[in-house]
């Protein structure tokens, strides 16, 4: 009689459902994976209850228990980011906003005050202006280069917060100067390094206590993951983890694996997008339908010297510009684009554009938009990996049909 052999064998009399749940472990053989493997698991088993109990009490360091606490794949991503940023440790998070929230809640208590640069991502503005006050944490905003006022406002503040390259007006923070002010005031400085990435800048080398990223952007680089990371020293990380372990803003192992994949090509992508962004910015400076271009590597930028000193002369893969005619003309222009797509986010393989007041900074009222340097025709362009000449042609035809 032909067909498959019987399921039961003399060596294993367990039922088929049990054997389906507990398949045999294949024999090991030589060969190591070239890239990190995904440990797509939620919970871990132990050989003895004592080890299980000790690991459960410690949460980190004595064994893997539960992926909300630790996971080999997310740990591998954290270790890679700590190495790139030059910090002792790094903690992955489910998003960039989760990492930023962790920094604020771990380092501040009710009654504390944050001093922040005014040039902020809209989501961070919402957090500082709307959510943190509900927990008794207030925020004072200053222009990123108003050092005299910052020195005064740091008295009594709990921490200083800024972005290496401000979103969306591309102002570069003088991290060395800000780091000195924070040090003199005895407060930690937390820096969002998303727009620069560790390829262009490592804020910990300039006085930052903690560095946060949206890993969704240049770290991941392919528009296919949501994630964040916070890089800092061991003592600060103890405070961060005490908060994060309980609230659970955990990065999924698969997204951690995608981020690890992205890290391998991040330097190449950042250099390519920076070169293309500079070429595009120079083109836009000469276009009659554009009345201002914001990109720190331009010779005409007020931050050019700082860009050269802090970022190695590269301005990153994101730029901004004002379309003549305000919001209506900016909308018409974006609708005519063919290669460049209207979409949120940045730092990925595809070029994306947003009208800042309508998308990324909807949380700001008119006066706040004006203070942040966001006009009615303000567009933010994330430059991807397409040929720069093709992107310029697309921008030209979109602007030329005004």
Image (cartoon, rainbow, N blue to C red):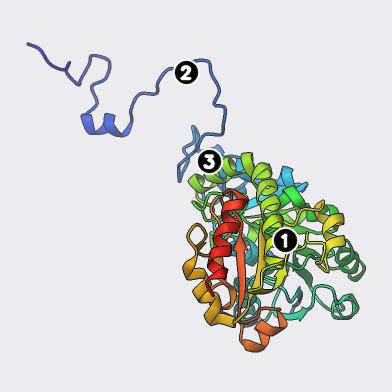
Q: Are marks 2 and 3 in contact (CB under 8 Å)?
A: no
Quadrant hosting residue 295: bottom right
Label 3 Cα crowd, 10 Å radius (few <14 / some 14-19 / many 20+): some
230 displayed left or right of 399: right
Note whether 358 is above or below 304 in the view shown: below
Name the residue rendered at 16%, 18% in the picture. Answer: 6
Q: Is any part of residue 71 visible from this angle?
A: no
Q: Earlier in the sequence, mark 1 or mark 2?
A: 2
Image location of residue 379, percent across then percent down: 60, 71
Q: Measuring 76% from the left and 51% from the top, which residue is drawn there? A: 200
Question: Label 1 belongs to which residue?
Answer: 282
Left/right of residue 231 with respect to residue 342 in the rendered view: right
Q: Eyeballing the image, is 136 above or below 384?
A: below
Is residue 281 something that shows in the picture? yes
Residue 28, numbered circle: 2
What residue appears at the point 80 percent right and 73 percent down from the top-left corner? 144
Q: Position of residue 62 (x, y in %)?
A: 62, 40
Residue sitting nearer the eye, 387 or 49 = 387
Residue 249 falls in image quadrant? bottom right
- Circle 1 or circle 2, nearest the eye: 1
Residue under label 3, please give it.
Answer: 52
Secondary structure of the residue carrying tag 3 is helix
- 1 and 2 marks in contact (CB < 8 Å): no
Question: Farthest left residue?
Answer: 1
**Which mark is first along the chain, 3 or 1?**
3
């Amino acid at each position: 009689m032909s067909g498959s052999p019987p399921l039961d064998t003399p060596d294993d009399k367990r039922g088929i459902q049990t054997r389906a749940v507990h398949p045999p472990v294949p024999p090991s053989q030589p060969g190591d994976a070239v890239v990190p493997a995904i440990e797509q698991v939620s919970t871990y088993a132990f050989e003895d209850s004592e080890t299980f109990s000790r690991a459960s009490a410690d949460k980190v360091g004595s064994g893997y228990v539960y992926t909300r606490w630790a996971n080999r794949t997310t740990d591998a991503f954290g270790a890679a980011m700590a190495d790139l940023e030059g910090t002792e440790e790094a903690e992955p998070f489910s998003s960039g906003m989760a990492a930023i929230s962790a920094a604020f809640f771990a380092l501040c208590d009710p009654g504390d005050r944050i001093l922040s640069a005014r040039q902020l991502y809209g989501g961070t503005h919402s957090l500082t202006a709307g959510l943190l006050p509900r927990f008794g944490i207030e925020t004072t905003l200053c222009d990123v280069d108003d050092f005299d006022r910052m020195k005064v406002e740091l008295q009594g503040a709990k921490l200083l917060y800024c972005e290496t390259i401000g979103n969306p007006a591309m102002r570069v923070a003088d991290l060395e100067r800000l780091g000195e002010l924070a040090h003199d005031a005895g407060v930690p400085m937390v820096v969002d390094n998303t727009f620069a990435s560790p390829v262009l800048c490592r804020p910990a080398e300039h006085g930052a206590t903690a560095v946060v990223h949206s890993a969704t952007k240049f770290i991941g680089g392919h528009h296919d993951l949501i994630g964040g990371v916070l890089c800092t020293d061991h003592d600060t990380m103890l405070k961060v983890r005490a908060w994060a372990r309980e609230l659970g803003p955990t990065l999924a192992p698969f997204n951690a694996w995608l981020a690890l994949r992205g890290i391998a090509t991040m330097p190449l992508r950042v250099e390519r997008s920076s070169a293309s962004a500079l070429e595009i910015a120079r083109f836009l400076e000469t276009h009659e339908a554009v009345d201002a271009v914001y990109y720190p590597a331009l010779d005409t930028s007020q931050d050019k010297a700082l860009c050269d000193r802090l970022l190695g002369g590269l301005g990153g893969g994101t730029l901004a510009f004002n379309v003549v005619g305000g919001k209506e003309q900016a909308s018409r222009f974006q609708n005519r684009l063919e290669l460049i797509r209207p979409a949120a986010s940045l730092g990925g393989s595809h070029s994306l554009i947003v009208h800042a007041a309508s998308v990324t900074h909807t949380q700001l009222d008119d006066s706040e938009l004006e203070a942040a340097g966001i006009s009615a025709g303000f567009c933010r362009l994330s430059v991807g990996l397409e040929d720069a000449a093709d992107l310029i042609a697309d921008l030209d035809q979109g602007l030329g049909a005004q």
